Amino acid sequence: MAVLGSILIADDEETYRNSTVYLLQQRGFACDGAADGEKALRLMRENRYDLLIADIRMPGNDDLELIHSAQEVTGGIPVILVTGYPSVETAARSVPLPVVAYMTKPVDFDELCANVEAVMDRSHTKHLATKTLEAMEASVRDLREVIHALGGPSKLEGRARLAENLDAAMMRLAECYQAVHGLHASLTRGGAVTDPCRVLKCSRLECLEAAVRDSIAVIEQTKNSFKSKELGGLRRRLREVLAR
């Protein structure tokens, strides 16, 4: 089973810490536990985590010291705070920090999982958006270099090589569009998005659609001569392909 994300749980209550680590592991998350702020920071320096779940009142977290230090170590890890002693003061101090949830003990595990999944979903989408942007920027740089080089030597072999490079750059841009397509699907939770081939006006798609239409027409013309359930099923499947 694929790991859904990596979580660090910092809590000095051993039973709560170990049981929460176990239950989240059962849900598909990679989890580590730390009994104090010092060990939690050491683990964050040694490993990459998508989320920190931390108790407010624990060794090494005076005045939310662990949460502040965690931001410096990780560059901005999201945090879920849990406490058996909720107060307006601690809630107010957590507002400027990247705290995504403030939960009181005993923690409802289903509610905790809902918060964890929401964080992981945002983290995945942000990572996908960052990678997409990096790929797009690299592709645009490549394309600019090719276009700039087209103003250079006009030797046939040189221009032919540039044309090949231009084709490669355009293919990379098409791949970037596919990445944007995937990002859009992630943001809409799998909702309907425009087919990349239609946006790019793919000539191959047009040829394939024409071939499918011709195949349907031939089956229609011959259906009275050749009675076949298989041909009827094939016609329906081809129509479904066109409808998509």
Image (spheres, helix red, strand yellow):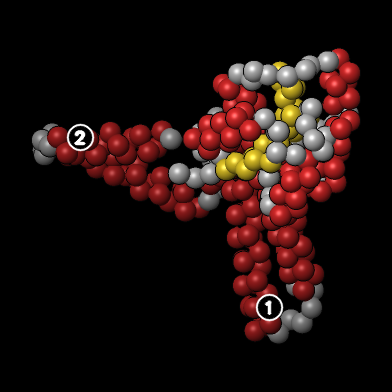
Q: Residue at x 12, y 37 (%)?
A: 228
Q: Is residue 105 left or right of residue 144?
A: left
Q: Residue at x 79, y 16 (%)?
A: 86
Residue 67 picture location, percent across and down: 82, 36
Residue 20 picture location, percent across and down: 59, 31
Q: Residues within 10 Å of mark 1 (few under 14, many from 20)?
A: some
Q: Is residue 79 left or right of residue 218?
A: right
Residue 68 picture location, percent across and down: 86, 38
Q: Find numbered disc 2 in the image and state the secondary structure of the residue it sits on.
A: helix
Residue where numbered disc 2 is placed: 232
Q: Is residue 136 visible?
A: no
Q: Quadrant of residue 35?
A: top right
**Quadrant housing the N terminus:** top left
- Does the CB distance between marks 1 and 2 fall below 8 Å? no
Q: Residue at x 65, y 26 (%)?
A: 115
In 3D space, how far apart are the residues under numbered discs 1 and 2 (Cα atoms)?
Answer: 52 Å
Q: Amino acid at mark 1?
A: Arg
Q: Nearest the camera: 225 or 142?
A: 142
**Quadrant housing the C terminus:** top left
Q: Is residue 244 visible?
A: yes
Q: Find numbered disc 1 in the image and state the secondary structure of the residue it sits on.
A: helix
Q: Residue at x 74, y 46 (%)?
A: 39
Going from N to C along the chain, the mark reached first, 1 or 2, is 1
Residue where numbered disc 1 is placed: 159
> Count of labels shown?
2
Q: Quadrant of residue 168?
A: bottom right
Q: Amino acid at mark 2?
A: Gly
Q: Nearest the camera: 85 or 201?
A: 85
Q: Quadrant of residue 59?
A: top right
Q: Which mark is residue 193?
A: none
Q: Is residue 241 left or right of residue 84?
A: left
Q: Nearest the camera: 81 or 225?
A: 81
